[in-house]
Image (tube, grey):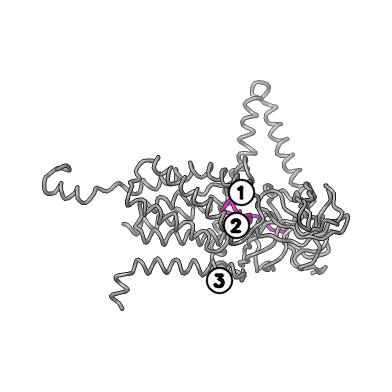
Amino acid sequence: MRGRRVVLFGIVGIVLLLVQMNIRIPFGYPGVRPDLILGLIVALAIFAPPWSGALLCWIFGLVLECLSGIHPGMGQIYYLVVLFFIQLLKRIFQFKSPGHVFALLCLAQVLKYGYILFLFLYVYEHTFSLKTFTQTWLFETMLTLPTALLVHETMSRLYPERKEPLFSRRLMYHGRYSK
Amino acid sequence: MLQFLSRNKRLLFLLLLLAATLTLFARDIRGSGSPTFFDRALLVLATPPLKLTTSVFDGVAKLWRRYVALIHAERENEQLRSQRDALLVENQLLKEQARENQHLRELLTFKQRLPFRMIPAEIIGRDPTSWFKSIIIDKGSTDGVSQGAGVITPEGVVGRIIKVAPSSAHVLLLIDVNSNIDAVVQRSRARGIVVGTGETLCRLAYVQKTENIVEGDRVITSGLGGIFPSGILIGSVVTLRHDKGGFFQYIELQPAVDFSKLHEVFVVLSDRTGS
């Protein structure tokens, strides 16, 4: 069952990539499009088993770089960092409501800004204007937040919330959840 | 040893992923940019679904343009005369056909005019990220397309081929941050390099302050580098600045090609006339 869900994540990822490559936004900056995969990565970080999630993340990054002019390693590192960061946060916080997921997506976009800016400035030394870079990022964020949230919410339907094992044990021994 | 491996398998898995990623990263920074077997295989696998999704998206767009818009017009015209509706539809379809005819004629004339071999190609996919500017076309190595070949339209330079699969190829656009093309200012013959900035404008870099450049000057390919034949229009100068420091002028170009409206392109196969 778990394996089947991971495969489903993979198929949804491929479909989203194809849609992302063909989508045309008639307003705003030309060529700027929503990062639909990001919603899937957040869903993977929250719902999928950690290691199969990481592997899928890595594969999505690799496919993205093969189909784009992106530098090798860029996509994989970004998606893996987002995945591990959310998994780390999951140990402290619980992400159940769409509001929480929205906050995670905002955080992921902020990470993206810093990461790509660092690569452009110090690793690849590209010629670009910071103003345009920021505007591109803002517009992408504006498109990504609602669409990625939608992707996440759709994927979350596949993972019904599990009861804590401790609660299940309580239910078994005492016939109720609370002590 | 086995015990160690089974105890630390998660850590080892993570290290393996990181090592694979860093290898790719290092390979790119070292500059060996030739596509790997995996790149080519993925492009081969992605081509049929890309063609399919492009045709679906184009079909929906066409349906919207041709019919849904007309239904709206029809609603307005219903109050006038029903006969007029039919004429409007017919008129619209004929106009569309005439436009398409004109466009195809222009493409044919352009192809016949230039003294080098080219093949037409259609765009089947665009870059999935917002940060890089590239497209995927439906012609590949079986059609004679090779890595590094130039891509143009009747308006001007589009970019160059960076990855080739048997039936598709990846084109790095002129406006991408990784793009560099050797260029000449048509009027003054000043030389420079057109560098992509990731936005709608490009920069003409390394033009000395002593060179005579004015706004509106046309910038063309120099023919050096062997990617593009000389004389293909790249764009025209829109911004010109002489900063106090440095040896070079700050020049911004408006590309001749409107990248948001690209549908068909030509791949330059060789600079020889004939076969």
| Discs 3/1, front | 1
Q: Where residue A175 appears, x then y in whole percent?
A: 12, 44
Q: Quadrant of residue B267?
A: bottom right
Mark 2–mark 1 CB contact (< 8 Å): yes
As helix, strand or loop, the secondary structure at mark 1 comes to: helix
Residue flagged by tag 3: what amino acid is it?
A: Phe
Q: Name the residue under label 2.
A: A120
With respect to residue B165, does B73 lie above or below?
Answer: above
Q: Residues within 10 Å of mark 3 (few under 14, many from 20)?
A: few
With respect to residue B95, does B170 lie above or below?
Answer: below
Q: Is residue A179 left or right of residue B248?
A: left
Q: Mark 3 points at which residue?
A: B37
Q: Mark 1 points at which residue?
A: A133
As helix, strand or loop, the secondary structure at mark 2 comes to: helix
Quarter of the picture containing the C terminus of chain A is: top left
| Discs 3/2, front | 2
Residue flagged by tag 1: what amino acid is it?
A: Phe
Whether residue B120 appears in magenta in the rendering, the answer is yes
With respect to residue B30, does B47 lie above or below?
Answer: above
Q: Which of marks 2 and 1 is nearer the N terminus?
A: 2
Segment tinted magenta in the rendering: B119-134
Q: Is residue B155 visible?
A: no
Q: Is residue A41 visible?
A: yes
Residue flagged by tag 2: what amino acid is it?
A: Phe
Q: Residue at x 77, y 51 (%)?
A: B243
Q: Which residue is drawn at 47% across and 56% down?
A: A79
Q: Where residue A153 appears, x then y in whole percent?
A: 40, 44
Q: Distance between the residues labelled 3 and 1?
A: 33 Å
Q: Which residue is drawn at 62% across and 37% down?
A: B67
